[in-house]
Image (tube, rainbow, N blue to C red):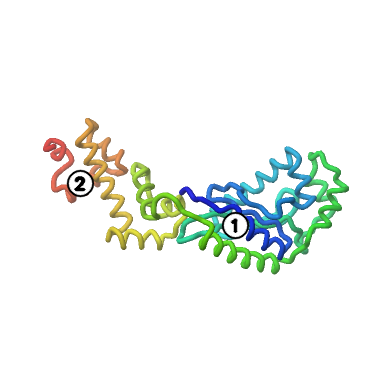
Protein backbone atom coordinates (compact mmCIF):
# COMPACT_ATOMS: atom_id res chain seq x y z
CA UNK A 1 0.00 0.00 0.00
CA UNK A 2 1.21 3.49 -0.87
CA UNK A 3 1.41 5.81 2.13
CA UNK A 4 2.32 9.48 2.19
CA UNK A 5 4.28 10.64 5.23
CA UNK A 6 4.71 14.12 6.70
CA UNK A 7 8.46 13.79 7.26
CA UNK A 8 8.83 17.27 8.78
CA UNK A 9 6.37 16.46 11.58
CA UNK A 10 7.82 12.99 12.07
CA UNK A 11 11.31 14.47 12.51
CA UNK A 12 9.87 17.00 14.95
CA UNK A 13 8.41 14.38 17.28
CA UNK A 14 11.53 12.24 16.97
CA UNK A 15 13.68 15.21 18.00
CA UNK A 16 11.52 15.79 21.11
CA UNK A 17 11.83 12.14 22.15
CA UNK A 18 15.55 12.24 21.43
CA UNK A 19 15.98 15.34 23.61
CA UNK A 20 14.30 13.52 26.50
CA UNK A 21 16.09 10.19 26.13
CA UNK A 22 19.45 10.86 24.49
CA UNK A 23 18.79 8.01 22.09
CA UNK A 24 19.03 8.11 18.32
CA UNK A 25 15.61 7.40 16.81
CA UNK A 26 14.67 6.52 13.27
CA UNK A 27 11.41 6.10 11.40
CA UNK A 28 11.17 3.55 8.59
CA UNK A 29 8.28 3.55 6.13
CA UNK A 30 6.22 0.44 5.37
CA UNK A 31 8.66 -0.42 2.56
CA UNK A 32 11.49 -0.69 5.10
CA UNK A 33 13.17 2.53 3.99
CA UNK A 34 14.65 4.90 6.60
CA UNK A 35 12.96 8.28 5.97
CA UNK A 36 13.55 10.20 9.22
CA UNK A 37 16.23 10.14 11.92
CA UNK A 38 17.07 12.24 14.98
CA UNK A 39 19.49 13.60 15.94
CA UNK A 40 20.71 14.39 12.44
CA UNK A 41 24.36 14.19 13.47
CA UNK A 42 24.91 10.62 14.69
CA UNK A 43 27.11 10.02 17.69
CA UNK A 44 30.87 10.03 16.94
CA UNK A 45 31.18 6.24 17.33
CA UNK A 46 28.47 5.30 14.83
CA UNK A 47 29.20 8.21 12.53
CA UNK A 48 32.81 7.11 12.08
CA UNK A 49 31.71 3.57 11.21
CA UNK A 50 29.06 4.69 8.72
CA UNK A 51 31.55 6.98 6.99
CA UNK A 52 33.48 3.92 5.79
CA UNK A 53 32.19 1.86 2.87
CA UNK A 54 32.49 -1.47 4.68
CA UNK A 55 31.08 -0.03 7.91
CA UNK A 56 28.03 1.38 6.14
CA UNK A 57 27.46 -2.01 4.50
CA UNK A 58 27.65 -3.77 7.87
CA UNK A 59 25.17 -1.28 9.38
CA UNK A 60 22.75 -1.77 6.48
CA UNK A 61 22.97 -5.54 6.86
CA UNK A 62 22.34 -5.30 10.60
CA UNK A 63 19.30 -3.06 10.03
CA UNK A 64 17.92 -5.41 7.37
CA UNK A 65 18.17 -8.44 9.64
CA UNK A 66 16.38 -6.60 12.45
CA UNK A 67 13.58 -5.38 10.14
CA UNK A 68 12.96 -8.89 8.82
CA UNK A 69 12.80 -10.29 12.35
CA UNK A 70 10.45 -7.49 13.36
CA UNK A 71 8.08 -8.33 10.50
CA UNK A 72 8.20 -12.02 11.28
CA UNK A 73 7.63 -11.65 15.01
CA UNK A 74 5.24 -8.65 14.66
CA UNK A 75 6.65 -7.01 17.75
CA UNK A 76 9.65 -5.27 19.22
CA UNK A 77 13.00 -6.82 18.33
CA UNK A 78 16.28 -6.04 20.10
CA UNK A 79 19.72 -7.25 19.15
CA UNK A 80 23.38 -6.36 19.43
CA UNK A 81 24.53 -4.79 16.19
CA UNK A 82 27.75 -5.64 14.39
CA UNK A 83 29.57 -2.88 16.30
CA UNK A 84 28.41 -4.11 19.70
CA UNK A 85 25.53 -1.72 20.47
CA UNK A 86 21.99 -2.74 21.46
CA UNK A 87 19.43 -1.66 18.84
CA UNK A 88 15.66 -2.00 18.97
CA UNK A 89 12.96 -1.72 16.34
CA UNK A 90 9.21 -2.20 16.52
CA UNK A 91 6.39 -2.16 13.96
CA UNK A 92 3.64 0.45 14.03
CA UNK A 93 0.12 -0.58 12.97
CA UNK A 94 -3.10 1.28 12.31
CA UNK A 95 -6.27 -0.84 11.99
CA UNK A 96 -4.05 -3.86 11.30
CA UNK A 97 -2.26 -2.00 8.50
CA UNK A 98 1.52 -1.77 8.81
CA UNK A 99 2.37 1.95 8.62
CA UNK A 100 6.06 1.85 9.49
CA UNK A 101 8.76 1.00 12.00
CA UNK A 102 10.33 2.90 14.89
CA UNK A 103 13.98 2.22 15.67
CA UNK A 104 16.11 3.47 18.52
CA UNK A 105 19.58 2.78 19.77
CA UNK A 106 23.19 3.92 19.36
CA UNK A 107 23.56 3.58 23.11
CA UNK A 108 25.41 1.24 25.44
CA UNK A 109 23.66 -1.23 27.73
CA UNK A 110 24.94 -1.03 31.31
CA UNK A 111 24.86 -4.83 31.50
CA UNK A 112 26.53 -5.60 28.17
CA UNK A 113 29.37 -3.08 27.80
CA UNK A 114 32.04 -4.84 25.81
CA UNK A 115 35.72 -5.13 26.73
CA UNK A 116 38.30 -3.35 24.61
CA UNK A 117 39.41 -6.49 22.79
CA UNK A 118 35.87 -7.29 21.73
CA UNK A 119 35.50 -3.80 20.24
CA UNK A 120 38.77 -4.33 18.37
CA UNK A 121 37.48 -7.63 17.02
CA UNK A 122 34.15 -6.20 15.90
CA UNK A 123 35.75 -3.23 14.13
CA UNK A 124 38.53 -5.24 12.51
CA UNK A 125 38.87 -4.60 8.80
CA UNK A 126 37.59 -1.03 9.03
CA UNK A 127 39.98 1.87 8.29
CA UNK A 128 39.57 3.42 11.72
CA UNK A 129 41.72 4.49 14.66
CA UNK A 130 40.61 1.66 16.95
CA UNK A 131 41.99 3.26 20.14
CA UNK A 132 39.96 6.39 19.40
CA UNK A 133 36.90 4.25 18.64
CA UNK A 134 37.23 2.49 22.00
CA UNK A 135 37.19 5.89 23.73
CA UNK A 136 34.08 6.89 21.75
CA UNK A 137 32.40 3.62 22.67
CA UNK A 138 33.02 4.25 26.38
CA UNK A 139 31.54 7.77 26.04
CA UNK A 140 28.21 6.48 24.71
CA UNK A 141 25.20 7.02 27.01
CA UNK A 142 24.40 3.90 29.01
CA UNK A 143 20.90 2.61 29.70
CA UNK A 144 19.39 -0.23 31.66
CA UNK A 145 16.90 -2.62 30.07
CA UNK A 146 14.21 -1.04 32.26
CA UNK A 147 14.91 2.42 30.84
CA UNK A 148 15.03 1.07 27.29
CA UNK A 149 11.61 -0.50 27.85
CA UNK A 150 10.24 2.77 29.23
CA UNK A 151 11.52 4.67 26.22
CA UNK A 152 9.90 2.05 23.98
CA UNK A 153 6.49 2.58 25.55
CA UNK A 154 6.66 6.38 25.49
CA UNK A 155 8.09 6.61 21.97
CA UNK A 156 5.54 4.16 20.59
CA UNK A 157 2.61 6.05 22.10
CA UNK A 158 3.89 9.37 20.76
CA UNK A 159 4.54 8.07 17.27
CA UNK A 160 1.20 6.29 17.05
CA UNK A 161 -0.59 9.50 18.04
CA UNK A 162 1.32 11.73 15.63
CA UNK A 163 1.10 9.39 12.66
CA UNK A 164 -2.56 8.58 13.05
CA UNK A 165 -3.85 12.05 14.00
CA UNK A 166 -2.17 14.34 11.52
CA UNK A 167 0.92 13.04 9.78
CA UNK A 168 -0.06 10.07 7.71
CA UNK A 169 -2.36 9.72 4.75
CA UNK A 170 -3.19 6.26 3.47
CA UNK A 171 -3.72 6.22 -0.26
CA UNK A 172 -5.29 3.60 -2.48
CA UNK A 173 -7.84 0.94 -1.67
CA UNK A 174 -9.53 -0.01 1.56
CA UNK A 175 -8.33 -2.96 3.61
CA UNK A 176 -11.05 -5.17 2.13
CA UNK A 177 -10.04 -4.15 -1.40
CA UNK A 178 -6.44 -4.97 -0.60
CA UNK A 179 -7.37 -8.44 0.64
CA UNK A 180 -9.67 -9.31 -2.25
CA UNK A 181 -7.17 -7.90 -4.74
CA UNK A 182 -4.41 -10.06 -3.29
CA UNK A 183 -6.67 -13.13 -3.43
CA UNK A 184 -7.48 -12.49 -7.10
CA UNK A 185 -3.78 -12.18 -7.92
CA UNK A 186 -3.02 -15.49 -6.20
CA UNK A 187 -6.07 -17.65 -7.06
CA UNK A 188 -3.95 -20.30 -8.77
CA UNK A 189 -1.72 -20.64 -5.68
CA UNK A 190 -2.29 -22.50 -2.44
CA UNK A 191 -4.01 -19.81 -0.35
CA UNK A 192 -4.46 -20.21 3.39
CA UNK A 193 -5.57 -17.85 6.15
CA UNK A 194 -1.95 -17.65 7.27
CA UNK A 195 -0.58 -16.71 3.85
CA UNK A 196 -3.13 -13.91 3.51
CA UNK A 197 -2.40 -12.52 6.98
CA UNK A 198 1.38 -12.82 6.59
CA UNK A 199 1.41 -11.06 3.23
CA UNK A 200 -0.97 -8.25 4.18
CA UNK A 201 0.09 -7.90 7.84
CA UNK A 202 -3.38 -8.32 9.31
CA UNK A 203 -4.74 -10.58 12.03
CA UNK A 204 -6.94 -13.61 11.38
CA UNK A 205 -9.70 -12.10 13.51
CA UNK A 206 -9.75 -9.02 11.24
CA UNK A 207 -9.84 -11.28 8.19
CA UNK A 208 -12.82 -13.25 9.53
CA UNK A 209 -14.62 -10.03 10.46
CA UNK A 210 -14.17 -8.44 7.02
CA UNK A 211 -15.69 -11.32 5.08
CA UNK A 212 -18.45 -12.01 7.57
CA UNK A 213 -19.52 -8.35 7.58
CA UNK A 214 -19.22 -7.57 3.85
CA UNK A 215 -19.91 -10.91 2.17
CA UNK A 216 -21.69 -13.01 4.80
CA UNK A 217 -19.38 -15.94 4.15
CA UNK A 218 -16.07 -17.39 5.21
CA UNK A 219 -12.80 -16.54 3.49
CA UNK A 220 -12.63 -20.13 2.18
CA UNK A 221 -16.09 -19.81 0.62
CA UNK A 222 -15.16 -16.51 -0.98
CA UNK A 223 -11.97 -17.96 -2.48
CA UNK A 224 -13.80 -20.98 -3.91
CA UNK A 225 -16.45 -18.72 -5.41
CA UNK A 226 -13.84 -16.50 -7.07
CA UNK A 227 -12.06 -19.60 -8.40
CA UNK A 228 -15.30 -20.90 -9.87
CA UNK A 229 -15.94 -17.55 -11.53
CA UNK A 230 -12.42 -17.64 -12.97
CA UNK A 231 -13.00 -21.18 -14.22
CA UNK A 232 -16.31 -20.23 -15.84
CA UNK A 233 -14.60 -17.38 -17.66
CA UNK A 234 -11.90 -19.75 -18.96
CA UNK A 235 -14.53 -22.25 -20.08
CA UNK A 236 -16.23 -19.53 -22.11
CA UNK A 237 -13.12 -17.94 -23.58
CA UNK A 238 -10.45 -20.63 -23.95
CA UNK A 239 -9.97 -24.09 -25.43
CA UNK A 240 -8.11 -25.45 -22.44
CA UNK A 241 -9.24 -28.80 -21.04
CA UNK A 242 -11.43 -28.97 -17.95
CA UNK A 243 -8.50 -30.40 -16.01
CA UNK A 244 -6.20 -27.55 -17.03
CA UNK A 245 -8.82 -24.98 -16.11
CA UNK A 246 -9.39 -26.62 -12.72
CA UNK A 247 -5.71 -26.45 -11.79
CA UNK A 248 -5.22 -22.97 -13.28
CA UNK A 249 -8.12 -21.72 -11.17
CA UNK A 250 -6.51 -23.05 -8.01
CA UNK A 251 -8.27 -26.40 -7.48
CA UNK A 252 -5.99 -29.31 -6.62
CA UNK A 253 -8.59 -31.92 -7.67
CA UNK A 254 -10.62 -31.96 -10.87
CA UNK A 255 -13.36 -34.01 -9.20
CA UNK A 256 -13.65 -31.50 -6.37
CA UNK A 257 -13.75 -28.66 -8.89
CA UNK A 258 -16.48 -30.37 -10.94
CA UNK A 259 -18.61 -30.97 -7.84
CA UNK A 260 -18.39 -27.34 -6.69
CA UNK A 261 -18.97 -26.09 -10.23
CA UNK A 262 -22.17 -28.14 -10.54
CA UNK A 263 -23.39 -26.82 -7.16
CA UNK A 264 -22.88 -23.22 -8.30
CA UNK A 265 -23.94 -23.38 -11.95
CA UNK A 266 -26.30 -26.37 -11.94
CA UNK A 267 -24.39 -28.21 -14.66
CA UNK A 268 -21.02 -29.83 -15.33
CA UNK A 269 -18.09 -27.77 -16.64
CA UNK A 270 -18.20 -29.59 -20.01
CA UNK A 271 -21.93 -28.92 -20.50
CA UNK A 272 -21.53 -25.33 -19.36
CA UNK A 273 -18.97 -24.82 -22.10
CA UNK A 274 -21.21 -26.29 -24.79
CA UNK A 275 -24.14 -24.12 -23.73
CA UNK A 276 -22.20 -20.87 -24.05
Residue in front for this viewpoint, 194 or 144: 144
Return the mark for residue 9: 1
First in sequence, mark 1 or 2: give its number.
1
Does the residue at mark 1 contact the one at mark 2 (Cβ under 8 Å)?
no
Q: Quadrant of residue 207?
A: bottom left
Residue 3 x %, y %: 49, 50
Q: Residue at x 31, y 50 (%)?
A: 223
Return the mark for residue 115: none
Q: Is residue 246 left or right of residue 182?
A: left
Q: Quadrant of residue 209?
A: bottom left
Residue in front for this viewpoint, 137 or 191: 137
Return the mark for residue 261: 2
Give the SS element for disc 2: helix
| Residue with the most extreme right position | 131
Residue 57 x %, y %: 69, 40
Q: Residue at x 36, y 47 (%)?
A: 181
Give the SS element for disc 1: helix
Cα–Cα gap, marks 1 and 2:
54 Å
Residue 214 x %, y %: 30, 59
Q: Is residue 2 left or right of residue 129?
A: left
Q: Is residue 78 visible?
A: no
Amino acid sequence: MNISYNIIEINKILSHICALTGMTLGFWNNKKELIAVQPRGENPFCNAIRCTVEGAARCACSDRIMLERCLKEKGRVTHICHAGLPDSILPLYYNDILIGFLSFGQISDVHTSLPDEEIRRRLSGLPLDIDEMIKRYKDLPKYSEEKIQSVTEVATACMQFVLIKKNIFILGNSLLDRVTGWIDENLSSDISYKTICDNLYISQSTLYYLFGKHYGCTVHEYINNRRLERAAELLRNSTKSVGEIAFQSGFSSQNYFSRLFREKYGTSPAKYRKEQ
